[in-house]
């Protein structure tokens, strides 16, 4: 009688880039052909409770059962035309159940990948021809990376602006790629900002919280685009407090929030 058990895992880690110990880009290749998805959607990753955790992780209370599959949804960062793997941009939540296990994965490690992508945080909701302002904190940048990698291949007229906030410059994942895109694509503007410049004195760029940067007119000054709902739509992704405050700022300028099937000029997704 066979004692073999079927593995719950259906994908392999084919790339792992550590931005720093608490930020990682993970590339996962499914055993089966990769599902189709739209830029801005999320996929599901999973590991069993028996999977090892990184040393930085906080004590787990209660300890997860060994054979329990822990699943979480994460925004996809890879282009929708990339068929070899799917990419995720992850931050370590030391008290979390899953990320301490995901951070322990190495090249060749096995992992569970959900069979489909989901979510409506996509460019489908934007009126044709309108510019797109993509605002994020931390790993809230991930869905925008997918959008830019997919859209900037053929979109040469529509303006895209990314405003990305982090504590330090080394928290600005994909910074090199975004700076290169900004040099190569006249219709793309990248505005990074940090909130702790006193501890990062070599950073050259804007400093302060996203809401302050917006209030100072960063979008208008750096891209030449007016912060006007007739010309642009705004995506917000990341810290719920940032989303709440910036949403109020934008509504004061005439932008309207999307609610369910009612599509406005502000599209938001909280990352907490």
Image: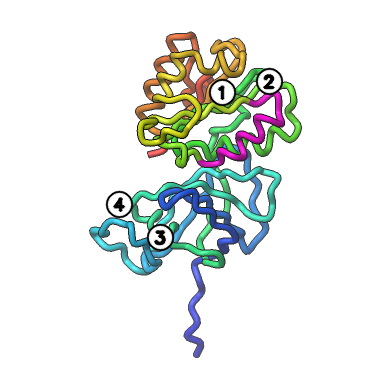
Q: Mark 2 points at which residue?
A: 128
Q: How far apart are marks 2 and 3 (CA)?
A: 41 Å
User: For mark 2, does the 10 Å Cα neighbourhood hold few (<14), some (14 to 19), or many (20 or more) residues?
Assistant: few
Q: Which of marks 4 and 2 is nearer the N terminus?
A: 4
Q: Earlier in the sequence, mark 2 or mark 3?
A: 3
Task: For mark 4, give the secondary structure.
Answer: loop
Q: Name the residue under label 3.
A: 101
Vertical placement of residue 183 versus 1, above or below: above
User: For mark 4, does the 10 Å Cα neighbourhood hold few (<14), some (14 to 19), or many (20 or more) residues?
Assistant: some
Task: For mark 2, give the secondary structure.
Answer: loop
Task: For mark 1, give the secondary structure.
Answer: strand
Q: Name the residue under label 1.
A: 133
Q: Name the residue under label 4.
A: 95
Q: How far apart are marks 1 and 2 (CA)?
A: 14 Å
Kindly identify the residue that appears in the image at 36 percent across and 31 percent down: 198
Q: How far apart are marks 1 and 4 (CA)?
A: 33 Å
Depth check, mark 4 against mark 2: the one in front is 4
Report which quarter residue 168 is drawn in: top left
Q: Is residue 269 visible?
A: no
Question: Are the two marked residues, 4 and 3, in contact with CB atoms closer than 8 angstroms?
Answer: no
**Segment tinted magenta in the rendering:** 173-188
């Amino acid at each position: 009688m066979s004692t073999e058990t079927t593995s719950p895992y259906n994908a392999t880690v084919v790339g792992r880039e550590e931005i720093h110990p608490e930020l990682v880009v993970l590339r996962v290749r499914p055993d089966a052909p990769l599902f189709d998805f739209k830029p801005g959607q999320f996929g599901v990753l999973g590991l069993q409770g028996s999977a090892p955790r990184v040393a930085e992780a906080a004590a787990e209370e209660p300890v997860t059962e060994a054979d329990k599959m822990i699943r979480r949804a994460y925004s996809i960062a890879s282009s929708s035309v990339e068929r070899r793997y799917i990419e995720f941009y992850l931050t370590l939540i030391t008290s979390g159940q899953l990320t301490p296990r995901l951070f322990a994965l190495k090249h060749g490690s096995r992992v569970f990948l959900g069979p489909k992508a989901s979510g409506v945080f996509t460019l489908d909701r934007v009126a044709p021809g309108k510019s797109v302002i993509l605002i994020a904190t931390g790993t809230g940048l991930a869905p925008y990376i997918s959008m830019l990698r997919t859209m900037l291949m053929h979109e040469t007229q529509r303006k895209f602006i990314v405003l990305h906030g982090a504590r330090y410059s080394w928290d600005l994942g994909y910074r090199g790629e975004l700076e290169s895109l900004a040099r190569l694509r006249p219709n793309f503007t990248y505005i990074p900002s940090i909130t702790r410049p006193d501890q990062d004195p070599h950073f050259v760029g804007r400093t302060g919280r996203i809401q302050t940067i917006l209030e100072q007119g960063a979008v208008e000054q750096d891209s030449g685009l007016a912060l006007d709902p007739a010309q642009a739509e705004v995506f917000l992704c990341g810290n719920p407090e940032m989303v709440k405050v910036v949403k109020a700022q934008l509504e004061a300028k005439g932008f309207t929030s999307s609610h369910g099937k009612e599509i406005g000029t502000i599209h938001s997704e909280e990352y907490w």
